[in-house]
Image: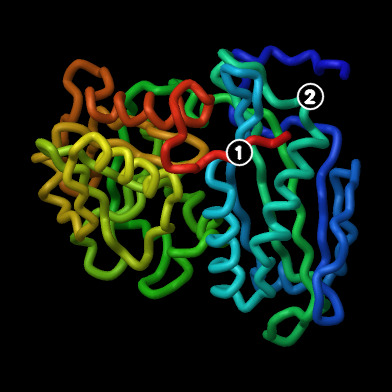
Amino acid sequence: MKQPEIDWSNLSFSYLKTDFNVRCTYKDGKWGEIEVSDSEYIPLHIAASCLHYGQEAFEGLKAFRGKDGKVRVFRMEENARRFIRSAEGLKMQPMPEEIFCEMVRKVVKLNERFIPPYGTGASLYIRPLEIGISPRVGVSPASEYLVIMLVTPVGPYFKEGFKPTKVCISREYDRVAPKGTGSIKAGGNYGASLVAGEKAHELGYSVMLYLDPKEKKYIDECGAANFFGIKGNSYVTPASESILPSITNKSLRQLAKDMGMTVEERHVPLEELASFEEIAACGTAAVCSPVSEIDDLDTGDKYIISATGEAGPVTTALYNKIRAIQYGEEPDTHGWCEVIE
């Protein structure tokens, strides 16, 4: 198998063409066969419901080449279940878990030469996407759906890697509406965050830390990732119906428990930021992204989390632990990884 000419250790988190993607269509009341394509394009009706009424949801998961040479996919079934919840939230046809997992296995095997070597810190990012493809000019759900899975090798989400970054708060922006689509992985949530995200970048911050969209009193999402804070022996993360349930956060909570920590899922008041010893964002793309400072652009308040500019010991331990499991360096005691033969 000819290996691609890629500088694996210097990959950014961006799209790079691979050999194949896989597709499956829901039509006439049933899911069809999984199809393999080498095209990067989709033939799509100009009135497709995904284009006009936002019937679109996606997922993100990764495959890792381990220390033993084996390829592992992390928590695939959890992504399949969240994909189902997203489809239901947008009145789309949910893809059964077994088809989702079969598509993941197939697209990883087909693009095996693009899985980065062990030791490079890179991984193969898997992006499942579901769209409504029926022509609709009246507001109504589609009757036909297309699921596509593409893959691309990626490096760290933030160019700094596992280094603390500064984030900011502004009450001028909401990521989602109360009781809206915040808890599902819909593309519209991310489109709605672009203005705030670019504003943060312009001001020299990595992301915008959102407050709850109803009262503006509690911590919500940290850019496109979940928030967690360390206080004493407690791992604290917001409980909110407008936050996407992060599979990485769920995994970190279990690892924190394994380390003997108390896990708290609850409202996190803004003023509590000052009491955290460590703060980080977490998600599939970034894994853990430590936060060094939070600046409130409206009040001028500054919360210094890491005066040294280094990640805290608990966040570092959690990050190293989850990565060790993903790369096969430590036992997968919770059965989170599937080896792709």
Q: Looking at the picture, how far across and down is residue 251, in whole percent?
A: 39, 44
Mark 1 or mark 2: whose residue is earlier in sequence: 1
Q: Is residue 149 above or below residue 289?
A: below
Q: Residue at x 25, y 44 (%)?
A: 297
Question: Disc 1 to disc 2, how far (Cα)?
Answer: 15 Å
Secondary element at image label 2: helix
Residue flagged by tag 1: what amino acid is it?
Answer: Val
Label 1 element class: strand
Question: Residue 308, how many percent across, how many down?
Answer: 20, 16
**Which residue is found at the position 17% from the left and 20% from the top?**
307
**In the depicted structure, whether residue 106 falls above or below residue 121:** below
Q: Is residue 165 left or right of residue 61?
A: left
Residue 43, picture quadrant? bottom right
Disc 2 target residue: 113
The disc placed on residue 73 is 1
The colour scheme of the drawn protein is rainbow
